[in-house]
Image: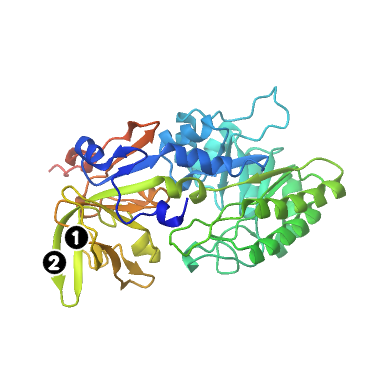
Amino acid sequence: MTLQQLFPVIRTDIAGVSIDEISLKFTTPCYVYDAEVIRKQIDKLRQFDVIRYAQKANSNIGILNLMRQNGVVVDAVSSGEVFRAKKAGFPIAADSDSIGQPPPIVYTADVFDRESLELVVAENLHVNCGSADMFVQLGERAPGREITLRINPGFGHGHTQKTNTGGEQSKHGIWHEQLPECMPLAAKYNLSITGLHMHIGSGTDFEHLSQVCNSMAKSARKVGPTIKTISAGGGLPTPYRDTDSGLDVERYFQLWDATRNELQNEFGHAITLEIEPGRYLVAECGYLISEIRAIKKMGQNLFYLVDAGFNNLARPILYGSYHPMSVCFRGETNSLTQKVVVGGPLCESGDIFTQKDGGFVSTRELPVASVGDFLVIECAGAYGYVMSSNYNSKPMVSEILVDNGKMYEIRKRQTNEDLIKGESIPSE
């Protein structure tokens, strides 16, 4: 399948279900996810011993359940994400009869908020620690646990500084040079360091990846043979443009497998190799369907104004992120195209889907459309709904999972009553 087939300019259906039918049943805007795309992305990573989904990318329990059904375990960065994982059927701990099985849920963070610490202690959750203070807080409450350390190797990578999770400007992980200082602190509370995790940011290339593997090996040697698991982290690239290249999974695995084998030979025991994708598993499955509600000329710019805004998809306004777009005609198809700016309904100048990092408005070559046609924002399955809001008092939209030609509403659209749930007017 070519990238043009992946991202057609004109689209009539999603996973075999017509966009007309989806919009008629669920109205717009709405998110639609193709379950088969998720399964295919999972299958690409089967060489790794453990696939651990970073659910912050898309945490709907319908998506989490699909991950669980396909043998994927989960990462949680908050007590709320632990709650979601449990609701989706993930057990807290591995089956005691299955020796060597990975923890179904790992709590990963740089800090413990008080609620999360209570949950981790009560539920005996495995923790991936990103700061030395977490050792103390966990050790005082639950000495004797096994823990994983997230290491900041001193460098990072990302398509924007906001998605770069390594280096001295990043808050994430334990600074690589401070690892020797952390080990006595862990020993004080009898915390056994059994795993290491590294994640330097989004869109990792092989030059940076090779550096990560080398840094992982150095850190593992500092800890020693208590290490049983190493995690390659996430950040796997996703093609959003026709010019973007996909991931060479075989080469990616081979680099990490070589690092794992090197450590196995030195430590004299097996080491589990994990990978922790988020966006990679769900980005390409997702579509945000909107309706064109106005077309207007502003100087040299022609605007398609749709009923979805950055309250639904924040990535363009946050990072200047590019999303492929297509048009679904409700009437006669038009093969002509024109350069347009795509914007939303919010009372905010930044409510533009076609913009570059820094807020610079750009245009997109799209079919000549009419009011009432649908504009579909594609590759929107990751960091879409999860980052949405009620800004301008807009209700959160519905989420639909399409599987084997059937539509499942995995989240209902909010009502106006939902908007004020929990609010109150002070009584005299």
**Which circle marks residue 296 in the picture?**
2
Question: Which is nearer the eye, 69 or 174?
Answer: 69
Query: Where is residue 22 drawn, in percent x and y?
Result: 26, 38
Spatial CA span between label 2 and label 1: 8 Å
Number of marks drawn? 2
Query: Where is residue 214 drawn, in percent x and y?
Result: 74, 61
For this view, does 200 lie left or right of residue 423? right
Does residue 75 appear in the picture of this structure? no
For this view, does 389 lie left or right of residue 240? left
User: For the point 20% across and 55% down, which residue is it?
Assistant: 392
* Residue picked out by circle 1: 305
Question: Which is nearer the eye, 328 or 24?
Answer: 328
Q: Earlier in the sequence, mark 2 or mark 1?
A: 2
Query: Where is residue 174 drawn, in percent x and y?
Result: 64, 58
In which quarter of the view is residue 395 placed? top left
At label 1, the amino acid type is: Leu
User: For the point 71% across and 55% down, which residue is it?
Assistant: 255
For this view, does 161 lie left or right of residue 322? right
Question: Which is nearer the eye, 221 or 306?
Answer: 306
Mark 2–mark 1 CB contact (< 8 Å)? yes
Name above or below for residue 407 compared with residue 320.
Answer: above
SS assignment at label 1? strand
